[in-house]
Amino acid sequence: MEETMFWSKEGKKIRCGICSFNCLIENGSFGRCKLRYNENGSLKMKNLGKIKDINKRSVESLPLYHFMPGHEAMVVSTIGTNIDWISSIDDKVKGNKVKSEDLIKELNAKKIKILAFNDSEPIISFELIFKIMRLAKRYNIKTVLTTNGFISSEAIKKIGKYLDAAIVNIVASADKNFYQKYFNVDDSYAIFDALKNFKKHRVFTEVTNTIIPEIGEDESSHSNLVDWLINNLDSSVPYHLLKFEPFGRFKDISETPVELFEKFAFEAEKSGLRFVYVHDPYVAGYSTTYCYNCRFPLIERLGDAIIENRLDGDRCPSCGFRISLVIE
């Protein structure tokens, strides 16, 4: 085990500050993530420097629709999480060691301009991703972080000047009752703090929301989330409604129906969000990026694949309206 960042002593216990749960860890015990460990008054990390996988994907598949559209990204799947969702909180994944320098040199040689960290909760592997992000900056490689939002303000501040984009994955519209019941989380407020901190440090941000039928489709929670995004971030923040597919302990719940997507997408647009996307092939019109000013189709997609990009730089070729996105 190797020593980590963001911790302080409280008697014989250690307060971990890497995520918003701020675990107080007894000597000889792990934190919530089951990877950060109090070893005689020093916080160590199991599997530090190891990852699950590396693969090449389009940025649209992350999903990231307004950040360097059409580019490919090298995606690093990290180990560890702090809420039991798609990936369980599990300390049994061994992973493979990765050398930061070798990874960045490979991307530079292949002329890949984007490096993304996703799967589980990358912030648990903070020391690794921080080191890689600093190296990426030297080679002008853009970095992307996918997170559930339970990340401390100190951690965001530390990586803020190296991180280019963030995808904040929300479940059930951040419904407090849902997070308490299914994720053992007292409150979902930390997600909103993270969103404000990404904005503060000028990290380009897109938001996803997985809509779960029956247990995670509360309309008032969705309305509150949309209003919060508009009032605290911007009406131009890209907003993705993701399809729930049954798995694990949620295997008896049906997948998100088209009708629910259509209702939530309509509500989000009616409330004032300018760029609403639905990740379901049966919901028409919500995979294309339209000009907010004149409704000209700017980027047409089939699923997450771009069919045609008509942008003139970052402007609409029809009316000249500037679109909120990052080209390079």
Image (cartoon, rainbow, N blue to C red):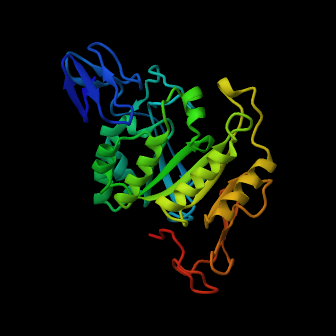
Q: Is residue 42 left or right of residue 178?
A: left
| Residue 222: x %, y % from top left | 64, 49
Q: Is residue 109 visible?
A: no
Q: Describe residue 262's horizontal placement relative to residue 196 as left or right.
A: right
Residue 263 vertical placement versus 289 (above, below): above
Q: Residue at x 69, y 77 (%)?
A: 295
Q: Say which quarter of the image contains residue 48.
A: top left
How far from the left and from the top, in percent, is residue 292? Answer: 63, 75
Q: Which image quarter holds the C terminus?
A: bottom left
Q: Residue at 50% across / 63% down in the picture? A: 67
Looking at the image, which residue is at 41% across and 54% down? Answer: 196
260 lies left or right of 220: right
Query: Relative to 214, is 118 on the left or the right?
Result: left
Q: 52 or 187, which lies in front?
A: 187
Q: Quadrant of the N terminus?
A: top left
**Residue 197: x %, y % from top left:** 37, 52
